[in-house]
Image: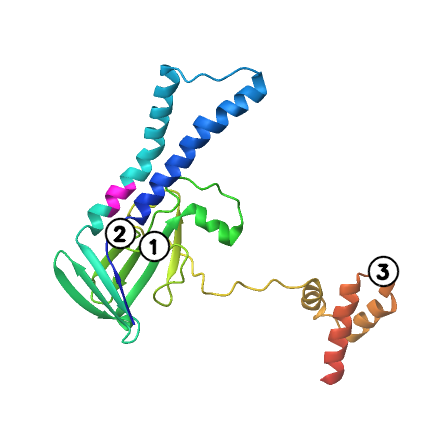
């Protein structure tokens, strides 16, 4: 099966939709809230309208800059993933190159910081630039591509190649000299020790007499500590 990716307008449509939602909230909900709070009607005069226009322009500048940055990078780029033959075909400026997945040296997804919520549950608020992101794909022969999400929408999908790492940034502008360590989300997080396991580590240097003293005075110790001693005594008896 092959999947082809080239410039699409999903990201631009989503940006326009987000702006409409924000505008609707300001124009409809704010006057309702104002009337409920103050008991008088809110009037949109010329000054307020200009403030709204300025607010819309200013909040969109970062998103527009990133979109133009992505478009400039990918305007003459398209690529194809061949899942059966495990090949990647990338066309840039009319020149098509073919790579095997085994030829990939490094694969990194650069996503907006908002998407780090899935890891640390920090509750970050989405912004107009949150959905921007790109795939930094490097090959062993030195070729390198920045495949942005104006070519493909990969934010909620599994990585397209194995061993892909992640970088989360507030402003995901294409940074070609980025050398910071990326996160490997495929790696299982280290399991934290239970309290009993912690006591096992703590008591393992004690001799049998000291362990027996703890058992004899078990009411003075936490149940996890007593359980740890029982585990250690069992190990010694087995040995």
Q: What number is the disc on residue 153?
A: 1
Q: Is residue 231 above or below residue 48?
A: below
> Which picture quadrant has residue 227?
bottom right
For mark 1, does the 10 Å Cα neighbourhood hold few (<14), some (14 to 19), or many (20 or more) residues?
some
Front position in the image: 82 or 170: 82
> Which picture quadrant has residue 210?
bottom right
Residue position for label 2: 8
Residue position for label 3: 220
Q: Which residue is painted at 87% across and 62% down in the image?
A: 219
Label 2's element? Answer: loop
- x%, y% of residue 111? 38, 50
- Mark 2–mark 1 distance (CA, rounded to whole Å): 9 Å
Q: Which residue is painted at 87% across and 69% down in the image?
A: 216
For mark 2, does the 10 Å Cα neighbourhood hold few (<14), some (14 to 19), or many (20 or more) residues?
few
Residue extending furthest toward the bottom: 239
- Mark 3–mark 2 distance (CA, rounded to whole Å): 68 Å
- x%, y% of residue 169? 39, 46
Count of numbered tags: 3
Q: Which residue is painted at 76% across and 64% down in the image?
A: 224
- x%, y% of residue 115? 44, 50
Q: Which residue is painted at 49% across and 43% down in the image?
A: 124
- x%, y% of residue 22? 42, 33
């Amino acid at each position: 099966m092959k999947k082809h990716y080239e410039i699409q307008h999903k990201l631009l449509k989503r940006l326009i939709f987000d702006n409409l939602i924000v505008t609707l909230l300001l124009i409809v909900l704010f006057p309702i809230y104002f009337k409920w709070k103050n008991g008088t009607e809110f009037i949109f005069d010329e000054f307020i309208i200009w403030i709204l226009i300025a607010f819309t322009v200013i909040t969109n500048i970062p998103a527009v800059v990133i979109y133009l940055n992505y478009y400039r990078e990918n305007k003459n780029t398209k690529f194809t993933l061949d899942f059966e033959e495990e090949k990647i075909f990338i066309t840039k400026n009319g020149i098509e190159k073919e790579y095997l997945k085994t030829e990939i040296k490094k694969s990194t997804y650069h996503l907006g910081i908002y998407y780090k919520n899935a890891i640390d549950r920090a509750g970050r608020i989405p912004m107009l630039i949150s959905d921007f992101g790109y795939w930094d794909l490097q090959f062993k022969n030195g070729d390198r591509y920045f495949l942005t999400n104006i070519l493909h929408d990969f934010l909620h999908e599994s990585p397209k190649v194995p061993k892909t790492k992640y970088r989360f940034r507030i402003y995901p502008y294409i940074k070609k000299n980025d050398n910071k360590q990326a996160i490997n989300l495929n790696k299982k997080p280290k399991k934290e020790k239970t309290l009993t396991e912690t006591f096992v580590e703590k008591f393992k240097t004690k001799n049998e007499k000291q362990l027996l003293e703890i058992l004899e005075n078990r009411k003075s110790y936490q149940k996890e500590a007593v359980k740890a001693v029982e585990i250690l005594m069992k190990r010694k008896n087995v040995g």
